[in-house]
Amino acid sequence: MSIQIPPAALAPDTLDSEEEHGVGLWRGAFRRMRRNPTAIVGALIVLGFLLVAIFGPLLTSYQPGSAEWSGQVTPTSVPGPSENHWLGLDRFGSDMWTQLVYGARQSLVYGVVSTALGLTVGAALGAIAGGFGAIGGRFGTWVDTAIMRVVDIMLAIPSLLLAVSIAAVLGQNKYSIMIAVGVAQVPIFARLLRGSMLGQGQADYVLAAGALGLRKRRIVIGHVMPNSIGPTIVQATLNLATAIIEVAALSYLGLGEADPAVAEWGRMLVAAQDRFDVAPRLAILPGIAIAVTALGFTLFGEALREALDPRTRK
Amino acid sequence: MLRFVLRRLALLVPVLVGLSILLFAWVRALPGDPARSLLGERATPEGIARVNESYGFDQPLVQQYITYVTALLHGDFGSSIQTGQPVMDSFGERFPATLELGFVALMIAVVVGVPLGYLAARHQGRVLDTAVVSGSLLGVVTPVFFLAILLKLVFADKLGWLPTALRQDPRVDATHVTYFYVLDGLLTREWDASWDAIIHLVLPALALATIPLAIIVRITRASVAEVMNEDFVRTAEAKGLSRSTISRRHVLRNALLPVVTTIGLQAGLLFSGAVLTETVFAFNGIGQYLFEAIGQRDYPVLQGFIIFIAIVYSLINLTVDLAYGVIDPRVRTQ
């Protein structure tokens, strides 16, 4: 479900605008993003989400999954907004707002951990494959091919289904979803970084560095790597959106956190299903929370990509 | 061309072999005893031993793997531990459901997405464009299952216009030949059965269509916008061709290349989305089958499912690559 970027689109090799003469790649990108309303909206949503997730306990006086008011919930009615519960109660008699706030924490942790896992493993594999591929020679090509074959195997299954299979095999525990969603992202990062490293390997500055007598290993680590990492970072931002949706999807399929005291957006949706007729907000609120959060990361990621893309600089 | 096809098919072999080893090792190495889960709480040691023996779980791993692959090569994907039904038979009944659903969803996405993307590119920066772009963004970030739940809530539960679940009303007395329910009705001249299958398809297909739709809109828009700035379009304008001729013969024809690739690449999304959509609508396809298998730790089904999807998915990707060669002559010469 992730949006992939062609590596060439982000090759950070031209800084031709006069205004930005002498400005570094990331600083220039930051300046462009400050002027882009889409980027600002995205950043604000992401910031809001982070604040809610981090300072969640300060925003509510209740505990998640307390089911304190379960006596008020009947099959035909779930108490709506009131003085004490401004979003009403949930299906199990916990405070809805508290559930949503703690759900944000859960999403943040799951999203960040799984994406970090995918990024670390994927980028490491991609860097090794791309590095050895760029160095070339028999051994280099062999390493590159071997790693990419493994990546091919992972790519043979659609990402969400890969995550579902891994989570199903790992069983229902705290870490299985993070690992599953993370591992499913590995091939994306591996391919992306390898592709842009091989692309950079052909650049003039690599040739120049070679002519200056730099060792190949040093060119790859010191020059090719830093110049290739841009697309991977953009992809990581976009993947946070995908990861949050996938985590919710796995929870929805019953593969998530087993502890009922943990609030999780995807599971809130599941629980809401048999109270549709009486209280549609039980499903709508967590659904909107997921969509808005994913929107924030997507807008931010796309603005970042645009800001880093030399072709879109005017 | 033939060499290209053969080479691509040959590349598939190591992927599938690797996948079968990984899957095999993985599923066995992890906790959760299949025999115990089959027999439930009251399992006796003798019962477990009997199940292990009949399913070969007591054999050495290498032996189990060889047996497994040999069977795979003979088209035997194993049998469900829960129902005893061969996995392949279940696929035969259920895969058509997923194909039917995926096909309709993809049709909706293409038929709506390409014109919308084209219009947006033609009216860049205006209200229509902004609306289309924002809409497509919403489509990408809205979880499929959430949208499915909303559609079900509004159009099935509240308004009652469309059925809430299943592929066909159980009261409809339909004969199943191909297990493509819409087609079956047409073949057997049971028109009401076809019609019933169609109305059961509407909501799940709409839910499933959103993400591919959003992506197709965005790619079409970007591609058309890029082609419109090309020199050959300016040349066509300069030589006085009418706007519609330029659109049809020059802009669309060139702009649709990346769109076709994108459409092909939606297969993965459709499979993933189908698992969620089918779960929401109790639509009896392979997604629903996987969902049941997960709940019951049905190893042979899980294994069979993943291998099956990998083969189908790889073949679809191969077809897309080939189609690209047919559409774009430049690819063929490489």
Image: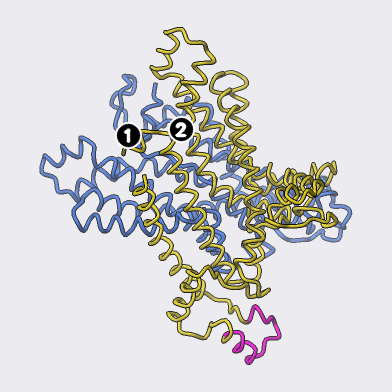
**Protein chain holding label 1:** A
**Image position, residue A166 (x, y; %):** 52, 63
Magenta residue span: B36-52
Q: In this rendering, would A61 be left or right of B56? A: right
The type of residue carrying mark 1 is Pro
* Residue A281 visible (yes or no): no
Q: In this rendering, would A306 be left or right of A250? A: left
Q: Is residue A202 inside the magenta stretch?
A: no
Q: Which chain is yellow?
A: B
For this rendering, which residue is in front, A142 or A230?
Answer: A142
Neighbours of disc 2 within 10 Å: few (<14), some (14-19), many (20+):
some
Q: Which chain is blue?
A: A
Identify the element where label 2 is drawn. helix
**Image position, residue B28 (x, y; %):** 51, 75
**Protein chain holding label 2:** B
Residue drawn at (40%, 44%) of the image: A232
Residue drawn at (83%, 45%) of the image: A82
Give how far apart the Cα atoms at labels 1 and 2 are: 27 Å
The type of residue carrying mark 2 is Leu
Q: In this rendering, would A24 be left or right of B65? A: left
Residue drawn at (58%, 38%) of the image: A45
Q: Is residue B47 inside the magenta stretch?
A: yes
- Residue B257: which numbered mark, if any? 2
| Quadrant of the frame with the C terminus of chain B | top left
Identify the element where label 1 is drawn. loop
**Badge 1 is on which residue?**
A12
